[in-house]
């Protein structure tokens, strides 16, 4: 009991320090925050922390300061109420985005296994792989690991969540639909894991990147963008990447369409994008992918091709709704508005 | 016969010409016929030219070539196998080609083996190889029984099908390229694909045209045909191999475009009767029209989305065929 | 014309024909008779070149029959099969025209005279009284009419040897006789060689110049009807003893009457 108390107070102190540093800009704010947290410290049962105002899903009554109080009940994106009796320490992620979140939150050591596609950060290479939703998950091995919680994407793996819950496992699904959702989701996972500090740090950095891009493109005329993230395919609204393009000062030429679709090349020529984005590996542009687009018959009249504005972006960063999504935002912004980038 | 051929053949050719011009004129940006013609004559603006000459014209051409190849190959298979279910894919050619294409896609070798022609070249080779395996299994004492041949085709197809499924499941992309390849398409292939395919098509069609009378005799039964002077085994091999080459050529450039090879020869038979001297040349023209329109719908219906070509050919074909079957009176040979 | 020397045929383990020697020459009608399974159809397949014998040789005009190109062979030998024409949607005229296949180039035309095929096709159709059915689909004809169309097809083929595999099986007696009369008249006119498998011994006796009687794959007896249609010979092959009498109207034509 006393060790927990000690830990808690250390964390609170660290948090206070962080708040103080942030608060230096705005004196009033810092002061009031200080007051509140001090109050918290003295009387355990108080109102919710103002800094936690973005959290919407978790049962806030139980929370105070930066220590998560268990049992904790949160509602996940599958609509289930998930209860944690104690701090989960045996973690499994079945989707690359959540794997990246867990590692970013400093919980990498607690991850027992991941799915086949989780390949970032590089420490994941040493972890056991449990298959994938496409080729089949090794459920037996998963159960044998006795994880405290399994992280999945509720949009892509709702049935997986159900199956695992039927097996008595605790499953937490996130399904962020926007870049702010990603930040919220990271905060919630930080809460679940009792890693709120790291969550704050991660989301703060992400928010800063978003603000940087927003500020840069605030007065820029949106450029027409065609995104071909899979040969011959593009997407309209409803896809995450569409939001990234919009945020980055672009305008998807297929914003009138919903979801992914095989594109009619005539329409691309007709809509004449100023920038064409395509995905490639982490090392950046592969000339093959670029050539496939620039040499396509009829595409030679498109402005983006004429002006060599056909740019490759990292497909993993752009498609995984994890902490690196804001890196992708910056990448896309720099692709669309190289003249504004520093 | 000649009169019938001139009548129906002339009519179908006119329809093809009309369809060609109409299809060339409609698309994402409706271009008036006048502009289409001036563009074809090199007087259009840059964008119209890019759309009409570099995008639309090659894909229409490819649709025409693929349609005629599949339809005439279907006629060939139906003639030799005398089976109502015979289509260009019955002996596993499409599965064989798909295995080749799936392999290339799965291992990302799209430009590794034969430049950008890796998929068509490999799919063509595996498609043709499949026929030889099927024939090898079916051959008894130097003779091919049609029942054994069909059975052998079914077995090989099932085997290859599971192989394709395996590769699909191993494929790690969200948009499964293998599945989309197999649904067929003629978009974004430029001029190279039609050029690659045209010689096979021309030779194949000429060979099949010379086999029309022999196929008519086949309809009476193999022994009847034999005693009327048809070299049975040689004719079978000629027609099977030619039809397979045509099918493999079509599948390798456009994926598995279904239903054309089944429906078009039947459709023609319902209208003009069982004479292969008419069915073969008419299949060439009607097959072209069929796939041309299917592709026009594929690119127009959900603009700016594309619908897989194979989906349209089947969606159009099945009900139309059912209607014809219900209505047709003359010379139904099922 | 056709000389079969010591031919035998074996399918898998089953011996169907054994050491047959048969020579058919000139203008005659040779009937092949014998009980079911005696090898009649197999013998005709070997003689017509449809199948090759396991041992022995079949020669046509002093040349092995297997060396003939299929079209050349079709100009020599025409075969009328037992089973009726399938219903595949061709008209009577289209079927009859198919007889010209061996004479046509790959373009479908004949080189000799201007339109010989039209002449012989029309002529044969008229001769077999099929004019009124000319544009009808074969599918809609009766069994007897179908067999007449099939016969018209082999006549148009202008063979030197005609082989008929039980041509009268599916026909009533009126059609049976009509069929055989047409064949006989044509045979006399063109001096053809006709080889015909017949089930009906009385018809065989009436129309054939020579009979070949098969039993279990070997020739039991060969010769003019008078010598083959004999109570003892028939009894030894068919395991039933008929009464044999001479046809009351025709000389040297024995007929059998079944006896219990």
Image: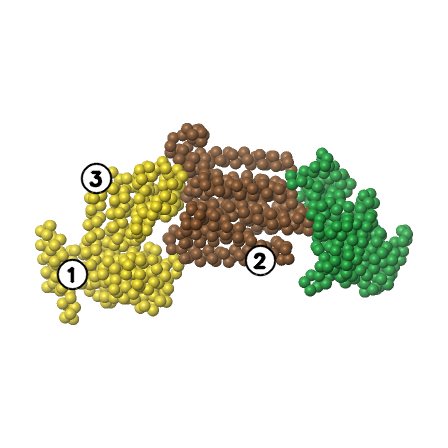
Chain colours: A yellow, B brown, C green
Task: Give the camera-side residue of B20 and B30.
Answer: B20
Q: Which image quarter holds the C terminus of chain C? A: bottom right
In this image, B334 relative to A56: left or right? right
Which subunit holds the residue at mark 1? Answer: A
Q: Residue at x 29, y 57 (%)?
A: A120
Q: Which residue is mark 1?
A: A65
Callouts 2 and 3 in the same chain:
no
Q: Position of residue B52 (x, y in %)?
A: 42, 35
At mark 2, the secondary structure is: helix
Which subunit holds the residue at mark 2? Answer: B
Q: Which mark is residue A219?
A: 3
In this image, C185 relative to B258: left or right? right
Callouts 2 and 1 in the same chain:
no
Q: CA distance from mark 2 to mark 1?
A: 76 Å
Contact between labelled residues 1 and 2, with CB atoms less than 8 Å apart: no
Label 1 vs 3, first from the N-terminus = 1
Q: Label 3 neighbourhood size at 10 Å, few (<14), some (14-19), many (20+)?
A: few
Q: Position of residue A112 (x, y in %)?
A: 29, 65
Q: Residue at x 42, y 42 (%)?
A: B188
Q: Which residue is mark 2?
A: B137
Which corner quadrant of the image does residue A122 belong to?
A: bottom left
Q: Nearer the viewer, mark 2 or mark 1?
A: 2
At mark 3, the secondary structure is: loop
């Amino acid at each position: 009991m006393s060790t927990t108390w000690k830990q808690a107070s250390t964390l609170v102190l660290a948090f206070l320090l962080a708040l103080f540093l942030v608060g230096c800009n705005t004196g009033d704010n810092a002061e009031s925050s200080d007051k509140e947290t001090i109050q918290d410290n003295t009387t355990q049962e108080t109102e919710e922390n103002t800094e936690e105002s973005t959290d919407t899903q978790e049962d806030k009554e139980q929370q105070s300061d930066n220590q998560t109080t268990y049992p904790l009940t949160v509602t996940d994106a599958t609509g289930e109420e998930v209860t944690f009796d104690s701090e989960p320490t045996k973690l499994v992620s079945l989707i690359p985005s959540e794997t990246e979140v867990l590692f970013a939150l400093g919980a990498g050591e607690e991850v027992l296994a991941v799915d086949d596609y989780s390949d970032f950060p590089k420490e994941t290479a040493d972890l056991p792989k449990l298959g994938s939703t496409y080729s089949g998950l090794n459920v037996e091995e998963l159960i044998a690991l006795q994880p405290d919680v399994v992280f999945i994407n509720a949009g892509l793996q709702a049935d997986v969540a159900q199956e695992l819950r039927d097996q008595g496992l605790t499953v937490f699904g996130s399904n962020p639909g926007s870049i702010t959702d990603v930040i919220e989701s990271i905060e919630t996972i930080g809460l679940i894991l009792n890693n709120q500090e790291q969550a704050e740090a991660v989301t703060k950095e992400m928010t800063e990147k978003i603000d940087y891009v927003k500020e840069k493109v605030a007065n820029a005329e949106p450029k027409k963008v065609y995104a071909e993230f899979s040969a011959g395919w593009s997407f309209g609204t409803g896809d995450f990447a569409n939001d990234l393009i919009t945020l980055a000062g672009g305008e998807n030429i297929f914003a009138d369409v919903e979801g992914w679709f095989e594109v009619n090349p005539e329409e691309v020529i007709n809509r004449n994008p100023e920038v064409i984005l395509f995905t490639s590996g982490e090392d950046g542009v592969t000339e093959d992918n670029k050539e496939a687009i620039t040499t396509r018959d009829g595409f030679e009249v498109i402005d983006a091709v004429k002006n060599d504005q056909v740019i490759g972006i990292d497909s993993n960063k752009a498609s995984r709704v994890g902490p690196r999504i804001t890196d992708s935002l910056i990448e896309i912004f720099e692709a669309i508005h190289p003249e504004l980038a520093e | 016969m000649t009169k019938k051929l001139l009548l129906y053949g002339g009519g179908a050719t006119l329809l093809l010409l009309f369809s060609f011009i109409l299809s060339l004129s409609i698309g994402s940006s409706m271009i008036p016929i006048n502009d289409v013609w001036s563009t074809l004559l090199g007087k259009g603006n840059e964008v119209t030219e890019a759309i009409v000459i570099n995008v639309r014209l090659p894909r229409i051409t490819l649709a025409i070539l693929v349609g005629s190849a599949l339809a005439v190959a279907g006629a060939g298979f139906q003639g030799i196998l005398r089976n109502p279910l015979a289509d260009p894919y019955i002996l596993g050619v499409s599965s064989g080609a798909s295995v080749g294409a799936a392999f290339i896609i799965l291992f990302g070798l799209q430009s590794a083996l034969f430049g950008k022609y890796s998929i068509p070249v490999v799919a063509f080779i595996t498609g043709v190889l499949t026929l030889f395996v099927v024939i090898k299994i079916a051959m008894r004492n130097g003779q091919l029984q049609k029942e054994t041949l069909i059975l052998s085709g079914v077995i090989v197809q099932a085997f290859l099908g599971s192989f394709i499924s395996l590769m699909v499941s191993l494929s790690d992309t969200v948009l499964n390229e293998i599945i989309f390849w197999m649904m067929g398409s003629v978009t974004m292939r430029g001029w190279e694909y039609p050029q690659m395919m045209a010689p096979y098509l021309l030779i194949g069609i000429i060979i099949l045209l010379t086999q029309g009378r022999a196929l008519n005799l086949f309809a009476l039964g193999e022994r009847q045909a034999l005693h009327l002077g048809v070299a049975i085994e040689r004719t079978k091999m000629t027609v099977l191999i030619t039809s397979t080459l045509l099918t493999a050529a079509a599948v390798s450039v456009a994926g598995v475009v279904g239903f054309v090879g089944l429906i078009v020869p039947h459709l023609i038979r319902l209208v003009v009767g069982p004479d292969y001297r008419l069915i073969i040349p008419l299949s060439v023209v009607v097959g072209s029209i069929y796939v041309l329109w299917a592709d026009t719908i594929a690119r127009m219906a959900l603009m700016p989305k594309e619908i897989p070509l194979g989906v349209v050919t089947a969606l159009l074909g099945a009900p139309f065929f059912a209607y014809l079957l219900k209505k047709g009176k003359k010379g139904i040979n099922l | 014309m056709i000389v079969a020397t010591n031919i035998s045929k074996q399918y898998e383990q089953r011996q169907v024909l054994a050491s047959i020697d048969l020579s058919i020459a000139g203008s005659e009608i040779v009937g092949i008779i014998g009980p079911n399974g005696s090898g009649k159809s197999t013998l005709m397949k070997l003689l017509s070149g449809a199948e090759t014998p396991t041992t022995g040789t079949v020669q046509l005009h002093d040349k092995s029959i297997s060396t003939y190109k299929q079209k050349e062979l079709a100009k020599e030998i025409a075969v009328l099969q037992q089973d009726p024409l399938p219903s595949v949607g061709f008209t009577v005229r289209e079927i009859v025209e198919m007889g010209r296949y061996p004479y046509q180039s790959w373009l479908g035309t004949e080189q000799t005279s201007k339109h010989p095929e039209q002449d012989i096709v029309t002529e044969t159709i008229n001769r077999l009284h099929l004019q009124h059915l000319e544009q009808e689909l074969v599918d809609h004809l009766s069994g007897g009419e179908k067999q007449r169309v099939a016969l018209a097809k082999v006549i148009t083929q202008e063979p030197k040897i005609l082989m008929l595999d039980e041509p009268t099986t599916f026909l009533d007696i009126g059609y049976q006789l009509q069929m055989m009369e047409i064949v006989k008249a044509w045979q006399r006119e063109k001096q053809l060689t006709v080889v015909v498998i017949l089930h009906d011994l009385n018809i065989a006796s009436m129309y054939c110049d020579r009979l070949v009687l098969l039993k279990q794959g070997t020739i039991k007896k060969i010769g003019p009807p008078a010598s083959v249609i004999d109570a003892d010979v028939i009894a030894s092959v068919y395991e039933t003893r008929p009464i044999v009498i001479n046809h009351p109207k025709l000389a040297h034509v024995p007929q059998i009457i079944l006896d219990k």
